[in-house]
Image: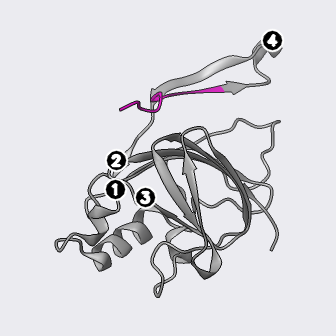
């Protein structure tokens, strides 16, 4: 199964002598959910609000919210396990909810209790399917089947991602903070 290139390089536009330099070339932490086998989340970068390019940009791990505010951005790499994980008798939905609230602060609190996985954020999202097949569920149960290479642009829409297949699905999400 292909994996995200686990390195990150941050370029500084203004340094001594006006030259760009690589600030870091480190491994990016991929979090594997204990309560949802096969569910992985990598927060590659986040700018909580409009970046100030006159200052050094830093990323020091998971912030108070993985959902950026207006003018901010965040980049996420997510692996969704097969839907069979959620229908297993051993699946503990409450444990998954608690772990999501702890790990995906600012996002998981938008998940609907009556319709798990459904959520809406004040963001414009670009979503790219890297591997596998996934179903985008919208209001009234309408679903759109997506395959490798498909791209979705969402403008603050209520939705859920459903893996109805038997294989994991890998996706890249770029969230742009917007006004409601």
Gap in angstroms between the C-alphas marked 1 and 2: 6 Å
Gap in angstroms between the C-alphas marked 1 and 3: 6 Å
Other-residue count near label 1 (Cα within 10 Å), few / some / many at <14 / 14–19 / ≥20: many
Tag 4 residue: 17
Query: Which is the main secondary structure of the residues drawn in magenta?
Result: loop
Left or right: 56 with respect to 172?
right
Tell me the quadrant of the picture where the N terminus can be found: top left
Asked whether residue 8 is drawn in magenta, I would say: yes
Residue 140 in which image quadrant: bottom right
Check contact, mark 1 vs mark 3: CB within 8 A. yes
Tag 3 residue: 163
Q: Which residues are magenta?
A: 1-10
From this viewpoint, is residue 62 visible? Answer: no
Residue 165 in which image quadrant: bottom left
Q: Secondary structure at mark 1?
A: loop
Asked whether residue 30 is drawn in magenta, I would say: no
Whichever of callouts 3 and 4 sits on the residue coming sooner in the sequence is 4
């Amino acid at each position: 199964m292909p994996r995200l290139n686990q390195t990150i390089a941050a370029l500084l536009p203004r340094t001594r002598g006006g030259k760009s330099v690589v600030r870091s070339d480190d491994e990016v932490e991929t979090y594997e959910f204990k309560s949802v086998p096969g569910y992985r989340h990598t927060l590659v970068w986040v700018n909580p609000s409009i970046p100030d390019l006159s200052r050094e940009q830093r990323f020091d791990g998971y912030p108070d919210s993985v959902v950026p505010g207006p003018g901010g951005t965040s980049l996420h790499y997510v692996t969704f396990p097969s839907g069979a994980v959620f229908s297993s008798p051993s699946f503990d939905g409450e444990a998954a909810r608690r772990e999501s609230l702890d790990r995906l602060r600012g996002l998981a609190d938008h998940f609907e209790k009556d319709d798990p996985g459904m959520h809406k954020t004040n963001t414009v999202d670009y979503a790219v399917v890297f591997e596998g097949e996934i179903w985008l569920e919208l209001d009234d149960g309408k679903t759109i089947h997506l395959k490798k290479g498909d791209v979705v642009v969402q403008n603050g829409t209520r939705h859920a991602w459903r893996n109805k297949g038997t294989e994991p699905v890998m996706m890249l999400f770029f969230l742009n903070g917007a006004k409601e």
